[in-house]
Image: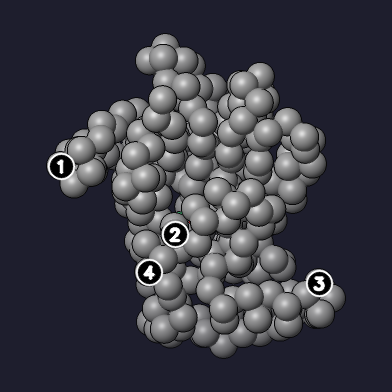
Amino acid sequence: MASTALVTGASSGIGKEFAKQLASRNILPVLASRNVEKLNGLKAEIEAEFGISAEVIPIDLSVPGSAGTLYEECETRGLDIDILINNAGVGMFGASMDQDPRTIEGMLTLNIVSLTTLSSRFAARMKEKGRGHILNVGSFAGNQPTPYFASYAASKRYVHDFSLALRRELKHTGVRVTCLVPGFVSTSFDANAGIGNPAYLKLSSRGSLPPAAVAKIGLRAMFKGKARVTAGIANKVLVFVVALIPSRPKAAIIHAGMGWIIR
Ligand SMILES: NC(=O)c1ccc[n+]([C@@H]2O[C@H](COP(=O)([O-])OP(=O)(O)OC[C@H]3O[C@@H](n4cnc5c(N)ncnc54)[C@H](OP(=O)(O)O)[C@@H]3O)[C@@H](O)[C@H]2O)c1
């Protein structure tokens, strides 16, 4: 029987590439995000290109309780999820005190709470079956305190640590948890994070990888059962360097760098 994969944030960027690459492996993708037109467009594209069906579940995962609703909808439709890809996420750029608290709460619900609920509930089902994969999308920003991306970066640090901890809890169950850590990726992420600063955009576009390449790295690591993968050689080197610096000076260095970029 063909496998089934739930991909959150499937309407664009890395998530869209996850869905297409899964379909190319004959895995039925379940596409979840808010924009139903985009999801239906992707479903048609997948069906035409790969001759495999796709399911569409429109959902806003920044709403409290929505992850439970998504889980129930999969159950109601009889979708037996073998692979969960927690990819949906947004960033918020700028000084924390200038940001709308309700928007921050929505971001944290999406990036942290929904990811946690989906991981826990699907992990329980997968554990019963004795097999399954969970791929959580973190971020290079989650490797250190990141001024002007403070709550986003901290939410991704949560994703990194939660993924490793859940992986240990699921050891010897046949369920593997992998965390993908992308650096800059050429998607609509920067625009959606409210970044209009030309200097920052120049920096991020110069160092960015295409979403298809990042999705491929994530899926390869997931199918190999790896705990964590950083996307791209340059980012791997940076991770090594950044790990040598203690957190407080790291925050000061990034604050100075960001301050220079956004001045
Ligand atoms: N691009 C980068 O530089 C970068 C770097 C590191 C990590 N990441 C991470 O990679 C992941 C994918 O981002 P991306 O770069 O592919 O950005 P993107 O192109 O903006 O895609 C974000 C996806 O998340 C979905 N989404 C946003 N808000 C949602 C909500 N409230 N409920 C459900 N779905 C929602 C969007 O779909 P709808 O609009 O249809 O809801 C979209 O499909 C994120 O977790 C992000 O933090 C990105």
Which label lies toward us, 2 or 4? Answer: 2
Question: Residue 247: which disc?
Answer: 3
Q: For residue 245, which quarter of the picture?
A: bottom right
Question: Does the residue at mark 1 contact the one at mark 3 (Cβ under 8 Å)?
Answer: no
Disc 4 target residue: 210
Question: Does the residue at mark 2 contact the one at mark 3 (Cβ under 8 Å)?
Answer: no
- Alpha carbon separation for disc pair 1 and 3: 49 Å
Ligand 1 contact, mark 4 (Cβ < 8 Å): no
Label 3 sits on what residue type? Ser
Q: Residue at x 68, y 75 (%)?
A: 239
- Alpha carbon separation for disc pair 2 and 1: 21 Å
**Mark 1 vs mark 3: which is more N-terminal?**
1
Disc 2 target residue: 216
- Alpha carbon separation for disc pair 2 and 3: 31 Å
Which label lies toward us, 1 or 4? Answer: 1
Give the answer, above or below, for where 186 lies relative to 27. Answer: below
- Alpha carbon separation for disc pair 2 and 4: 10 Å
Q: Is residue 255 visible?
A: no
**Mark 4 vs mark 3: which is more N-terminal?**
4
Density class for disc 4 (Cα within 10 Å; few <14, some 14-19, many ≥20) is some
Question: Residue 131: which disc?
Answer: none
Label 1 sits on what residue type? Ala
Which label lies toward us, 4 or 3? Answer: 4
Label 4 sits on what residue type? Pro
Residue nearest the observer in this picture, 150 or 167? 167
Which label lies toward us, 2 or 3? Answer: 2
- Alpha carbon separation for disc pair 1 and 4: 23 Å
Ligand 1 contact, mark 2 (Cβ < 8 Å): no
- Alpha carbon separation for disc pair 4 and 3: 30 Å
**Mark 2 vs mark 4: which is more N-terminal?**
4
Q: Is residue 249 visible?
A: yes
